[in-house]
């Protein structure tokens, strides 16, 4: 069979690629040359895509808990058990005892249907998605500034940038297409200012590389804002923009003389950064998980967006999941509806109530971490989880496991038998994106087609089918045809008004336009953070080249998993020497929430006082070191900069 | 003396034709298992197909790609007496995914065999010469077939010395062979361990500490050596100082392998495919392979121990 | 039908191309450039002659995949206590690939030699035996990254092809270069007429024109000397290697590269499939041993490995030619700038400067 065009399921660059299948076996995979992002190129994850998905241990039948073990069962039984559990919780304890957590890997049709299912079929306000564990803080922050909670420009435009500010993102390893465009820009004279505790592979192309300590970005970015404003480096029209004076007053507390002590960044470097970005303005401002998973991440994102607004530049939030953008656009969140409809916008809410024929709450429900806490407290009785391995992606797995075990009912839809699936009462075998039709939205706001290449493995079903079945048994209607669902989305979600299956068969999707979003400044408040003397190291838990998130897919590709055969953590050589730790030895990293063991490697590009722990090795994750004390404004757990200590294993 | 011919296009004219499809394994059955050391086992294996077994021949130093069904393939050297035709030994350290799975197998289980692959110890070329065999740890396994051949054809060769070092007495492979060989008067055997236990009365120290006891002259002698990289490094250094020339030191190299038939590219060192033109080389031949950075490097030898 | 040089070439009218393909289609599965969704033009199986895009440039996904597939099943097996069941899996249909460029033909010839000796890879061999290549001369280098002229692989071939077509406007010059090509032509010979002097003159004009139009240069000669003798400073390899994105695209898309990995994958019904798929020497896991030791631990050592394999006299002696056909795919698909010409240029020009700088450092 000739190549079928689909979209990569790993990161949010959204490369288009063709997959050739013959006799039900994948024969070939190659990038589209005409696609504006892939341009005939893929990264190693893209090239290894199919072996990550077609691994032998894919779930092929529903699993039902009988006694203490999960055993193969039928779809009828799985659906009816789920429905009766949901009904029971709802009637005994109310709709707030139900919770739904989705994944940023689902298609747009599935994301929308999940939200509709939770809010209109189940009637619960407790709906959230995987973005809550990664990049959700950018949504409110960008809505309050650029008005677009997404990249403002296309990836290809990066190559023409005059200057770039990139904070907290190992862009060359994690989003290679963006890293490649940055290099192209540098070859054309672009000046790059980068900031991260670690020195990344982008370093040779960077004009100025700042090294703040982990968790200390807000202070130096506020200092940068203050420098630009005090020196009047902005365009003369800027003070007329809404929010400018509030921004200025919010920066009154910035103390340049204490900056170096607090953050590790000297004010002279901040001044130089301001100079570079204004001499070669407008800048493109990018930021990634290094910033998005810190405490006060919302303030940091607002601050960075303000910089772009002051200098007439654009913002690109570097999101991870292939459909992080789509899941956000379509309202997979507890505090807004599809199209970023605020719950407080009564007119828009009435329109949704009409569209879905159900009442909708005016107050937010629980975020994903709060849902898990509520499970432990007994406030949530039944939880459905679609495609998110909570035990590894949420903090403090002891707490997560105990919370999930506390539930009356846990239903999980998954590709593989993950740690979360192991706790479920019912496990639905899900289709991968190779086995279904749908759409993803990439970081550029471009809606793109996902086309079915393989028949579903075993009895696997798409999440859309599962939701439609559940809804139908509950007496409501959700279409199981993705074409119909997208048509409904396009009818009700203004950003998706121009999107259709037919259109996507004729031309590449165009980035959606936000209607009338005005750019304005937002005030940025500072914060004080103490250091914990008992836990003197700052944790950097990150993704790593060749792998994605918790590695459920990427670890199953033999070529990808071959690259890092052993779980490791990295320390600066001096720190290791001070602690008397030898490279290659086993060390324990612990926090107030948990601990894990890793092999020690030395890496002098890490600053002292930090420990880098990649988060994809099977069965354990450094997220366990973080606690459920999440960032209050965004609800995202604090994975970057959390306090830990490091010791040899006795 | 040239072992692996410079012409890479030669067929390995030794022994067996791999058949019409060189990727298809032949099925063999495990007849016996010996626990050599805590991490090493010897599997005695014979082919299911009697006719194939009768015509199957291999030479000392060769290896087979062994399939552990359900897991994959690993290259394992033949470790028994090549004159013994009804079965052969595969001595395996359980380190990677496939070899660890192999260690779970039991008598009667089946494995797949593709082979024999690679070249062999130059037993023909060294006839009439004195032989110094130096090995350590699991490096004795690839040499064991050569030792059997030499002992069976003793009159064709000169003096014979066997030096063997292990980490501890329990980590010595083929302890039962040593008991038999020590009964002979036509082979000098010296053993050593890095760490002794109460039962050990022999030498303690690395294998080079045995060299003083070796009475052998360089002009008519050749060395076969195989063992952990660190051992090879010091052994070769010392041999060259003792006056052995580079073409009189022969070793067996190791690399990660996949296909074993010179196609997949994993085992290449410079322009040679270790699986077809090696793994046995003289030190002189290795000089032309500058990817093996000189004598100071871990790339030599087998790696039963991590550096 | 006989093998003929340019002088004895034939003519196939473009208006007869449809009938030509139908004729071939009776004996062969036809693979030719076709328009995929969104306009990407790549080789694919053709259902009807109208699908063929004759004025295509170059396919980024190399036709080596029709001989050494990206993913291929070697055999499958099932095992239980009683025994092992082994089942060969082979598919090698008769196929004709139309429109292959000279660079790819040279590469396939190289690969045929590699897989054919000293031992024979039966999968590659059966596909090669069952495939006829109808290659197309490049009247212009199809992409600005092309440099086949530096590698003796194009834009047209004198030998080493089955059938070579040259686009002369409303007709093709049709040259038969092998027995296989001659045999395949028998079913369509009635469509062919003898070429005349005007046709041959047009061909000569096209040759000269194409030769003059290359933008990319990759003179391998000096680089071959330096890599063969390992005279390139390690620092240069490390510097270049550190820029690599480690995506593996260069080796995947290189029509000459042959490295693969093999694994046993569980299939349905208790069967296991032994599959092989393209692998790359640019990954650290390519040579890492079970103990963790890696003979090529740094990016530089792996980059050196790739260029040694492509351009060294040891490999030229071994394989009959150097390992680059100048197709330029490694330039196009690279996320940074590590295509063959860039590296070759650095190796050629920077060596004396490095030596000089080292000297100055020692003195100063």
Image (cartoon, coloured by chain):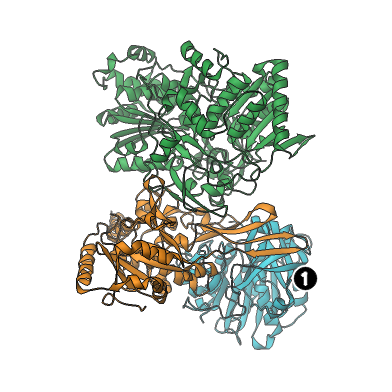
Colour representing chain B: cyan
Q: Position of residue A11 (x, y in %)?
A: 48, 39
Q: Is residue A639 visible?
A: no
**What residue sits 26% from the left and 19% below the top?**
A232
Q: Nearer the viewer, residue A353 or A136?
A: A353
Where is residue C356 drawn, in percent x and y?
27, 58
Is residue A350 visible to us here? yes
User: In the figure, A89 relative to C1: above or below?
Assistant: above
Element type where label 1 sits in the image? helix
Q: In the image, what residue occupies the spot 70% across and 54% down? A: C270
Q: Nearer the viewer, residue C70 or A618?
A: C70
Tell me residue B135's x, y (percent): 64, 69
Quadrant (top left, top right, bottom left, bottom right) of the C terminus of chain B: bottom right
Residue identified by numbered label 1: B176
Horizontally, is A507 left or right of B21 in the view? Answer: left
Tint applied to chain C in the drawing: orange
């Amino acid at each position: 069979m000739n190549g079928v065009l689909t979209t990569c399921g790993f990161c949010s660059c959204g490369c288009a690629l063709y997959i050739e299948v013959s006799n039900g076996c994948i024969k070939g995979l190659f990038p589209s040359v005409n696609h504006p992002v892939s341009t005939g190129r893929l990264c190693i994850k893209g090239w290894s895509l199919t072996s990550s998905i077609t691994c032998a241990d894919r779930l092929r039948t529903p699993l039902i808990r009988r006694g203490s073990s999960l055993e193969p069962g039928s779809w009828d039984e799985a659906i009816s058990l789920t429905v009766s559990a949901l009904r029971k919780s709802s009637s005994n304890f109310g709709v707030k005892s139900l919770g739904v957590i989705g994944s940023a890997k689902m298609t747009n049709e599935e994301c929308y249907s999940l939200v509709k299912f939770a809010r209109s079929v189940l009637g619960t306000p407790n709906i959230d998605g995987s973005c809550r564990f990664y990049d959700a803080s950018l949504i409110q922050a960008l809505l309050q500034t650029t008005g677009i909670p997404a990249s403002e420009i296309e990836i290809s435009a990066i190559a023409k940038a005059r200057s770039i500010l990139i904070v907290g993102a190992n862009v060359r390893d994690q989003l290679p297409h963006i890293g490649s465009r940055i290099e192209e820009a540098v070859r054309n004279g672009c000046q790059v200012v980068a900031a991260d505790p670690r020195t990344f592979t982008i370093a040779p192309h960077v004009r100025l590389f700042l090294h703040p300590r982990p968790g200390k970005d807000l202070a130096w970015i506020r200092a940068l804002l203050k420098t630009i404003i005090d020196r009047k480096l902005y365009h003369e029209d800027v003070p007329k923009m809404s929010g400018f004076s509030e921004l200025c007053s919010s920066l009154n507390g910035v103390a340049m003389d204490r900056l170096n002590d607090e953050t590790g960044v000297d004010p002279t470097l901040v001044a130089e950064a301001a100079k570079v970005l204004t001499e070669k303005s407008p800048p493109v401002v990018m930021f990634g998980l290094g910033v998005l998973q810190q405490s006060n991440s919302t303030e940091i994102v607002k601050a960075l967006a303000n910089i772009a607004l002051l200098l007439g530049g654009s913002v690109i939030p570097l999101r991870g999941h292939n459909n992080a953008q789509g899941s956000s656009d379509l309202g997979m969140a507890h505090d807004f509806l599809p199209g970023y409809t605020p719950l407080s916008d009564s007119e828009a809410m009435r329109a949704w109530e009409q569209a879905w024929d159900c009442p909708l709450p005016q107050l937010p429900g629980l975020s994903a971490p709060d849902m898990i806490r509520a499970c432990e407290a007994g406030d949530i009785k039944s939880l459905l989880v679609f495609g998110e391995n909570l035990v590894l992606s949420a903090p403090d797995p002891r707490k997560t496991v105990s919370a999930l075990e506390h539930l009356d009912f846990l239903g999980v839809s998954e590709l593989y038998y993950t740690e979360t699936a192991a706790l479920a009462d019912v496990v639905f075998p899900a289709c991968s994106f190779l086995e279904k039709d749908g759409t993803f939205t990439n970081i550029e706001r471009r809606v793109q087609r996902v086309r079915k290449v393989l028949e579903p493995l075993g009895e696997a079903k798409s999440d859309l089918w599962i939701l439609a079945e559940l809804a139908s048994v509950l007496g409501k209607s959700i279409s199981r045809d993705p074409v119909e669902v997208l048509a409904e989305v396009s009818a009700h979600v203004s950003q998706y008004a121009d999107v259709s299956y037919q259109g996507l068969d004729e031309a590449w999707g165009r980035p959606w336009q936000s209607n009338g979003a005005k750019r304005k400044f937002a005030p940025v408040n500072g914060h004080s953070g103490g250091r914990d003397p008992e836990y003197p190291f700052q944790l950097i838990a990150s993704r790593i080249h060749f792998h994605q998130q918790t590695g459920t897919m990427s670890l199953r590709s033999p070529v990808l998993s071959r690259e890092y055969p052993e779980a490791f953590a990295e320390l600066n050589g001096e720190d290791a020497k001070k602690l008397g730790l030898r490279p290659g030895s086993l060390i324990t990293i612990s926090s107030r929430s948990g601990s894990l063991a890793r092999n020690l490697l030395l890496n002098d590009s890490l600053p002292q006082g930090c420990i880098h722990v990649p988060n994809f090795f099977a069965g354990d994750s450094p997220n366990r070191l973080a606690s459920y004390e999440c960032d209050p404004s965004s609800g995202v757990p604090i994975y970057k900069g959390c306090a830990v200590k490091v010791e040899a294993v006795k | 003396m040239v072992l692996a011919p410079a012409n890479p296009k030669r067929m390995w004219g030794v022994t067996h034709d791999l058949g019409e499809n060189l990727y298809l394994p032949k099925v063999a059955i495990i007849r016996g298992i010996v626990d050599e050391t805590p991490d090493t086992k010897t599997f005695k294996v014979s082919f299911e197909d009697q006719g194939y077994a009768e015509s199957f021949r291999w030479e000392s130093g060769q290896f087979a790609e062994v399939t552990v069904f359900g897991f994959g393939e690993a290259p394992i050297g033949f470790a028994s007496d090549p004159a013994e035709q009804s079965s052969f030994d595969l001595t395996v350290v359980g380190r990677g995914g496939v070899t660890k799975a192999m260690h779970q197998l039991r008598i009667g289980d089946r494995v797949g065999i593709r082979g024999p692959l690679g070249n062999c110890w130059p037993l023909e070329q060294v006839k009439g010469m004195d032989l110094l065999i130096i090995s350590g740890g699991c490096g004795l396994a690839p040499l064991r077939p050569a030792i059997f051949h030499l002992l069976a054809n003793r009159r064709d060769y000169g003096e014979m010395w066997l030096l063997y070092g292990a980490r501890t007495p329990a980590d010595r492979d083929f302890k039962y062979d040593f008991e038999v060989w020590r009964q002979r008067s036509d082979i000098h055997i010296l053993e050593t361990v890095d760490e002794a236990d109460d039962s050990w009365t022999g030498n303690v120290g690395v294998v080079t500490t045995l060299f003083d006891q070796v009475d052998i002259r360089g002009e008519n002698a050749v060395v076969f050596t195989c063992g952990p990289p660190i051992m090879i490094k010091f052994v070769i250094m010392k041999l060259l100082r003792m006056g052995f020339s580079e073409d009189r030191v022969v070793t067996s190299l190791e690399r990660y392998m996949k296909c074993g038939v010179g196609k997949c590219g994993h085992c290449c060192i410079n322009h040679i495919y270790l699986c077809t033109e090696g793994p046995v080389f003289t030190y002189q031949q290795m000089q032309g392979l500058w990817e093996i950075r000189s004598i100071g490097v871990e790339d030599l030898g087998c790696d039963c121990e991590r550096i | 039908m006989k093998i003929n040089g340019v002088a004895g070439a034939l003519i196939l009218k473009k208006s007869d191309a449809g009938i030509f393909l139908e004729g071939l289609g009776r004996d062969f599965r036809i693979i030719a450039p076709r328009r995929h969704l969104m306009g990407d033009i790549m080789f694919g199986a053709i259902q009807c002659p109208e699908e063929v895009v004759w004025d295509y440039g170059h396919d980024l996904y190399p036709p080596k995949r029709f001989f050494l597939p990206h993913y291929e099943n070697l055999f499958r097996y099932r095992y239980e206590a009683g025994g092992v069941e082994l089942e060969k899996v082979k598919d090698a249909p008769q196929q004709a690939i139309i429109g292959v460029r000279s660079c790819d033909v040279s590469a396939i010839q190289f690969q045929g030699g590699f897989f054919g000796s000293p031992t024979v890879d039966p999968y590659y061999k059966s596909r090669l035996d069952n495939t006829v290549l109808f290659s197309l001369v490049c009247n212009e280098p199809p992409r600005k990254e092309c440099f086949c002229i530096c590698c003796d692989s194009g834009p047209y071939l004198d030998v080493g092809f089955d059938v070579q077509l040259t686009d002369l406007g409303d007709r093709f010059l049709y040259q038969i270069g092998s027995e296989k090509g001659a045999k395949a032509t028998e079913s369509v010979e009635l469509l062919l007429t003898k070429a005349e002097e005007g046709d041959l003159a047009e061909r000569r004009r096209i040759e000269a024109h194409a030769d003059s139009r290359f933008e990319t240069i990759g003179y391998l000669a000096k680089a071959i000397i330096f890599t063969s003798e390992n005279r390139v400073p390690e620092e240069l390899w490390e510097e270049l290697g550190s820029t690599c994105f480690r995506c593996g695209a260069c080796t995947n898309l290189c029509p000459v590269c042959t490295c693969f990995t093999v694994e046993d994958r569980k299939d349905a019904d208790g069967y296991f499939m032994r599959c092989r798929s393209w692998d790359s020497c640019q990954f650290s896991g390519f040579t890492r041993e079970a103990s963790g030791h890696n003979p090529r631990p740094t990016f530089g050592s792996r980059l050196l490995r790739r260029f040694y394999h492509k351009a060294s006299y040891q490999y030229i002696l071994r394989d009959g030619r150097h390992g680059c056909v100048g197709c330029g795919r490694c330039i196009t698909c690279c996320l940074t700038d590590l295509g063959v010409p860039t590296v070759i240029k650095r190796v050629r020009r920077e060596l004396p400067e490095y030596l000089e700088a080292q000297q100055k450092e020692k003195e100063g």
